[in-house]
Amino acid sequence: MALLETEGAKAIAAGIAILGGALGTGLAQSAIGSSAMGVIAEKPEQATRLLIWLAIPESILIFGFIVALLING
């Protein structure tokens, strides 16, 4: 029975790690995306630079996924 309890706790912890990463990424991208669209409307030449800033928060989700893998590993 103890094995099942530890496996369940690992699964819940991994889910929380991914959930936290996904929520953080979503909040960051919403703020960056809305600001970037305002800047692109005024200065279209900044579009490439701002798309890079929009992609950076994806690393938060990747880190959450890596933590989930380490927990289950």
Image (tube, rainbow, N blue to C red):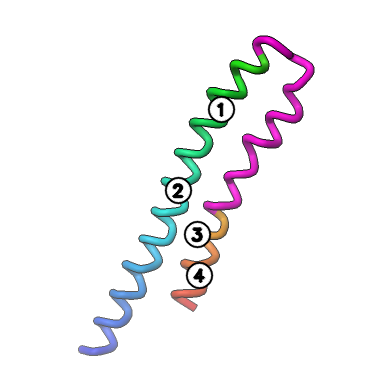
Q: Is residue 27 magenta?
A: no
Instruction: Name the residue carrying label 2.
Output: 22
Using the numbered discs, state the Cα–Cα distance from disc 3 to disc 1 in whole angstroms: 21 Å
Pointer 4 local density, CA inside 10 Å: few below 14, some 14–19, many at least 20:
few
Instruction: Name the residue carrying label 4.
Output: 69
Using the numbered discs, state the Cα–Cα distance from disc 4 to disc 3 in whole angstroms: 9 Å
Q: Residue at 73% across / 13% down in the picture?
A: 43
| Dot in front, 4 or 2 | 2
Q: Which residues are magenta?
A: 41-61
| Dot in front, 4 or 3 | 3
Q: Which mark is residue 33?
A: 1
| Residue type (three-letter) at the residue carrying disc 2 | Ala
In the rendered structure, are the residues bearing label 4 and label 3 in contact, judged by CB atoms less than 8 Å apart? no
| Residue type (three-letter) at the residue carrying disc 1 | Gly
Q: Is residue 51 magenta?
A: yes
In the rendered structure, are the residues bearing label 3 and label 2 in contact, judged by CB atoms less than 8 Å apart? yes
Of residues 1 and 41, which is closer to you in this image? 41
Give the SS element for disc 1.
Answer: helix
Pointer 1 local density, CA inside 10 Å: few below 14, some 14–19, many at least 20:
some
Residue 59: give x, y in percent of width and height: 60, 51
| Residue type (three-letter) at the residue carrying disc 4 | Leu
| Dot in front, 3 or 1 | 1
| Dot in front, 1 or 2 | 1
Instruction: Name the residue carrying label 3.
Output: 64
Of residues 43 and 12, which is closer to you in this image? 43
